Amino acid sequence: MTTQAPRVDHELIDAAADVARTRCRGDNHTIAAAARARDGRIVTAVNAYHFTGGPCAELVVIGAAAAQGAYELDTIVAVGDRDRGVVPPCGRCRQVLFDYFPDIEVIVGDGTGGAIRTVRISELLPVTYVWADHQLDEQQIE
């Protein structure tokens, strides 16, 4: 049995690259992220670098998506400014993405600007801390 690798969402990469090219300015905003919501919408955001450890673009896009009513994200990608291409999420973002969306797919590169592929977040964080008791049952939310 052959398993097919998840397709790469080039529209999502293009959306993040466009934001990186047009909105990232100076040292405060150097990475853009784009996420595809389950309903097909694309939500974009940029990081907010600060010496105290401001949020990465992936974390900002989670908040922006929620503010727009998109609570289920299927795929996410980050792209660096100055044509740096696809950038994999840092460790903190990997953990947060896993906690919020354990089935999310992440578009990553090989670090050389070459091969781009889509992987599940669990592949990027194979032995993770599971913190499931912080989430409310859907019945409690309604």
Image: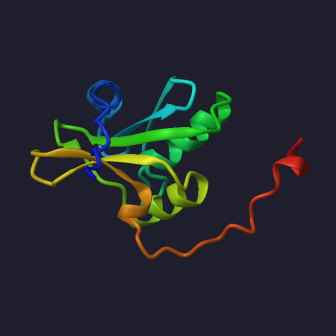
Drawn side of residue 125 relative to residue 37, left or right: left
Quarter holding the C terminus is top right
- Provide residue 26's location: percent of width, then percent of height: 29, 40
The residue under the point 37% across, 45% down is 28
Q: Quick check: 83 above or below 40? A: below
- Provide residue 25's location: percent of width, then percent of height: 31, 34
The residue under the point 74% across, 65% down is 134
Q: Quick check: 17 above or below 103? A: above
The residue under the point 51% across, 49% down is 59
Residue 53 seen in this snapshot: no
Drawn side of residue 10 relative to residue 130, left or right: left
| Residue 89 falls in image quadrant | bottom left
Is 67 or 37 nearer to us in this picture? 37
Q: Quick check: 125 above or below 69? A: below
Is 94 or 7 nearer to us in this picture? 7
Is 67 or 47 nearer to us in this picture? 67
Residue 81 seen in this snapshot: yes
